[in-house]
Image (cartoon, helix red, strand yellow):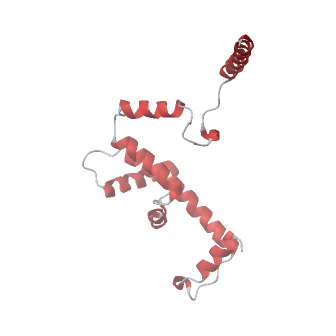
Amino acid sequence: MTFWKMIVSYYNASPKVVGLAKREKSHCKQRWGKINEGVCKFVGSYDAATKQRTSGQSEDDVLKAAHEIFLNNYKVKFSLEHAWRELRNDQKWCGTYGSSQQSSDSKRKKVGEEQSFQSSASMPSFNGEDEATAKPIGVKASKAKAKRSVGEEGKNLQDFQQI
């Protein structure tokens, strides 16, 4: 069974739509497209309103500002607030909202956090981590490594011959 067929059967089985015409796959896909587009645009407006948040503003004030930003940007009122309230904690929009909220909450970055991130990112993985996640070695470094290994083999061979 395909994804959209499961969505259609789930929607049509809902007690809230009893007595209404059954929706088909294309209807559900089109409706989700409209909801997704509108909510994505509003998430951007909400992030902008959150960044403009001043001391003493409540969550309702931020929401009103987001509606104003949406109206100014798209020249139409946002009418899918009910969908946004359901979807805003979804994984797709959590990353967007969470990153902007963190950056607006802490105006300054701590030096220790930034340095620890850089040092851990540049360190090669020795703890059994997947090599694919480590940063690849550069062209010059790989050539130097190849020359060193050839030089070391020659040195080891000379030491062995002297014995």
Above or below, 85 relative to 128: below
Foreground pick, 60 / 75: 60
Name the residue nearer the viewer: 112 or 52. Answer: 112
Please tell me which residue lies in front, 162 or 126: 162
Quadrant in the picture for the C terminus = top right
Location of residue 140 in the rendering, given as x and y in whole percent from the top left corner: 67, 19
Q: Position of residue 14 (x, y in %)?
A: 55, 82
Q: Is residue 75 visible to us here?
A: no
Vertical placement of residue 52 versus 138, above or below: below
Left or right: residue 62 compared with residue 33: left
In the rendering, at what x and y percent does residue 67 appear? 42, 55
| Residue 47, visible in the rendered structure | yes
Residue in the image at 63% along x and 84% along y: 21
Q: Residue at x 65, y 27 (%)?
A: 137
User: Would you say 162 lies left or right of 36 here?
Assistant: right
In this rendering, is residue 15 above or below 142? Answer: below
